[in-house]
Amino acid sequence: MAGATPKTSWFSLDWPVYEIRETFFSYLAENQYAKLSSTPVIPIDDPKVPLIHTCLNRLKGALNGTGSHRTCFSLRCIVTSSDDVIEHFRSDATYHRFTEILGSWSSGDYFKEEAIGLLHSLLSKKYGLPESIIHATYFSGDTSSGLSPDNESKTALQKCIGEERILPSMSKFNRQADGVLSPLQAKHIITGINLQCLAAILQKKESLYELDDYDNIIDCISSRAGEEFDSYSGKVGEADTDGVDTAYRLLADHMRMISVTNAPGSQLGKCVMFRLVTNVNNYNISVWLVC
């Protein structure tokens, strides 16, 4: 049940994906966040962006000074990278092009200390994650640009987790065309959690395709593939000698993606859809016919 106390075991199928999502929204509602309605993966009011691929696409209005100061949302994103998609799915059972991000946003309402405290409380108290697996990063500075470390974030993190789990990294500055870092003109707080990755931790799964929201899809593919094909076993890389497990992952992820991009109201250009699925279709056809 959303908003309930943490489960007795943090690695459990007692945390289905839908409940992880609802717990996130319930927790933020308790902290005066307004939930934004879901939006299509194809932006309605931004013709320059063919597909939603980052939380910032969803927050364009807030960046322009409109909208609520505290908001939370679920954002479905599609990776449109031109990298070797087949190789990603072959070598990595956690890779997916279609993903869902749980996000929160604050514009001029509060800043780092409260944001860090809220997120830590969500992970440790609501989801019941052990403190020992929670790590964080902060901006460690850039001597070449004369930028000091983000000690404000580091101090806030030290109030929540152990020093040994606080790692220097990342950047909070704008990198200009000449490579010089400069302070951002506006300061906002955005939190984004990959729902499938969080579910993999809570359900103690090494592959995202073993999560409960993939069960029916994988079973559907298996039932239609024919008895000559083994069920999905999670093999990657050289272990996937016949390429069948790679085909399972490709097809499962793209079935989810295509079902969303073809939902009523979506207006995805044919050339974009063609580019997304052509190589995937060719690979799957070769696997199912040749094996």
Image (spheres, rainbow, N blue to C red):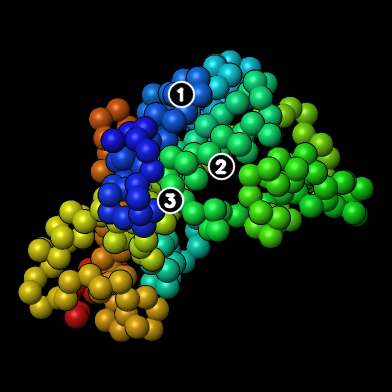
* Residue 142, percent from left and from top: 85, 52
Marks 3 and 2, Cα distance to the nearest angstrom?
14 Å
x 69%, y 34%: residue: 112
Quarter residue 20 falls in:
top left
Q: Is residue 271 visible?
A: no
Q: Which residue is mark 1?
A: 30
| Labels 2 and 1 touching (C-beta < 8 A) | no
Task: Give whichever of 216, 17 is nearer the camera.
Answer: 17
Task: Give whichever of 281, 208 is nearer the camera.
Answer: 208
Quarter residue 5 falls in:
top left
SS at mark 2 in the image: helix
Say which quadrant the N terminus sits in: top left
Among numbered discs 1 and 3, the one appearing first in the sequence: 1
198 above or below 3? below
Marks 2 and 1, Cα distance to the nearest angstrom?
15 Å
Residue type at the position of mark 2: His
Q: Which residue is mark 3?
A: 198
Residues packed near mark 2 inside 10 Å, few (<14), some (14 to 19) or many (20 plus):
some
Residues packed near mark 3 inside 10 Å, few (<14), some (14 to 19) or many (20 plus):
some
Task: Give whichever of 134, 80 is nearer the camera.
Answer: 134
250 above or below 60? below
Marks 1 and 3, Cα distance to the nearest angstrom?
21 Å
